[in-house]
Image: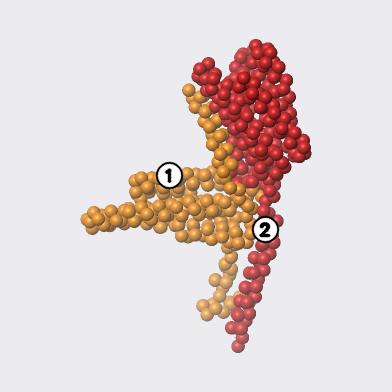
Amino acid sequence: MAASLLWIAGIVLESVILFRLLKCRLFAHYPFFFAYMAVVCSLSIALWPIYQFHYVSYPKFFWAKQFLNLLAGFGVLFEIVRKSFQRYPGARNFATTVLAAMFAILCGYFAFRLLPLPLAVANEGLSSLERDFRTVQALTLCGVLVVISYYRIDVGRNLRGIMTGLGLYVGSTILSNVLRIHLGPTFDRGWNAIQPYSYLASLLIWTFALWSYAPAPAPEKPEEIDNDYEAFAGRTEAVLGTMRTAVSKVNRP
Amino acid sequence: MMQLVIFLAVGTGLLVLLLVAIRRQPSHAAGSAGELVTAKRTLESLQLGLLPADLVEQVFGRQDFAYISSIGSNELTDLFMSERKRLALMWIGQIRKQVRALKDFHVSRSRMFTHMSRWREFSIALDFAGLEIRCRVLQLLMRWRGPYAAPNFARRTATTAGRLCSVLDQSLAFLTPGTPARLGSESGADGTTLIG
């Protein structure tokens, strides 16, 4: 009963978010997040009858859903990086370098880990595979958060909400998956609670954050540097003029 | 077990980082004349007031302590130690404050520059982070074990801060008035100009 309620609440919130994204034309500003929500919502609706009436085959579909969700999540990450540093070219250069290096290292690691495995064996460890891919997401998000915190960039309510929701979901998924793998079936109950509730919390955050369009405010005074310099130079010139007059008075015989 | 620790650290780290990023106040773009001059003053107060080697040696060297101890009064030694501890904590507190102000100024400008050097920026970021950690550790050590807890560590912290200051000094060099070299060498003692 509780699981059904959570499922329905999830679909309702996903629909509300999609509706607000369409109504406020937010989909034009955040196309990857819109695509992510569309994928997640369609899969939730499609899987509902299987969960209710043919539970035996549900786990297979669950992992397929998780992987589609995961891939769409990378699109959201790309959007976060693209949008966060849009107005900060210096920070964008720095973030791109950090993330490219991180991605290269992580892709190398996964290629090394997965390529030697036959497909059947790889499929068996889906839970650990999801944990690993979520870890890639988490590390990428960590990189973005470090750069945002370092440069103290205001990303705006929408993007802050997207990051918080995604971070909360990814972080709790990693923690629950790793504990499930290490503790075994004893942790199943905890895993069954953490996964849906953290996702529901993320949906709530996204609903509030994306209720209306609230982009990052423009940096306050990027163009004023030159203007201020003019004023600064003007003041110096005035002082120099006064000094010149004083000196010429002294020099007079 | 190692794997468990790594994944737990990543999950927890992400959640903590998220909390830090949400709570952190964004800063505006610096670059106005007033801010440039303030940054320059901060830099000068660090370079000339807080970081000179002789001052660091005076605060963290044991010469004063040896002199007070030679008098043989426990009361005086205790008083000296508490005063020196207060002074050392003030010194490190000021360093932290000034370095933080410089960092705020630096990042609010560098984030706007397209042609900044990524490696230089990375190295500066590491220096700022390292310095912040060093200052914090030093504060804890001094609170716990007194002013002479880690004199070499304090000296190294001052050296790192000095290095960082000299890097940042280059970006604010245009605010330092140049001294006309010929004026000093080619003027007479009475102030008359010796050149054409």
Q: Seen in the image, is B150 located left or right of residue A206?
A: left
Q: In the rendered image of this protein, which colour is used for chain A?
A: red
- Tell me where residue A178 appears, x and y as whole percent: 54, 23
Q: Seen in the image, is B56 located left or right of residue A166?
A: left
- Tell me where residue A103 appears, x and y as whole percent: 63, 32
Q: Seen in the image, is B168 located left or right of residue A63?
A: left
Q: Assess whether mark 1 and mark 2 are in contact (beta carbons under 8 angstroms).
A: no
Which secondary structure, mark 1?
helix
Which secondary structure, mark 2?
helix
- Determine crowd level at label 1: few under 14, some 14-19, many 20+ residues with C-alpha closer than 10 A: some
Residue projecting furthest to the bottom: A253
Q: Which residue is mark 2?
A: A225
- Determine crowd level at label 2: few under 14, some 14-19, many 20+ residues with C-alpha closer than 10 A: some
| Relative vertical location of residue A120 with respect to residue A171 in this rendering, above or below | above
- Quadrant in which the C terminus of chain A is drawn: bottom right
* Same-subunit check for callouts 2 and 1: no
Quick check: can you spot residue A210?
yes
Marks 2 and 1 sit apart, C-alpha to C-alpha, by 37 Å
Q: Seen in the image, is B65 located left or right of residue B96?
A: left
Quick check: can you spot residue A98?
no
Examine the image and state in which quarter residue A251 appears: bottom right
| Observer-nearest of A18 and A112 | A18
Q: In the rendered image of this protein, which colour is used for chain B?
A: orange
- Quadrant in which the N terminus of chain A is drawn: top right
User: Disc 2 residue type?
Assistant: Ile
User: Disc 1 residue type?
Assistant: Val
Residue visible at 71% across and 33% down in the picture: A17
Q: Which residue is mark 1?
A: B137
- Tell me where residue A2 appears, x and y as whole percent: 61, 22
Residue visible at 54% across and 34% down in the picture: B13
Residue visible at 74% across and 28% down in the picture: A38
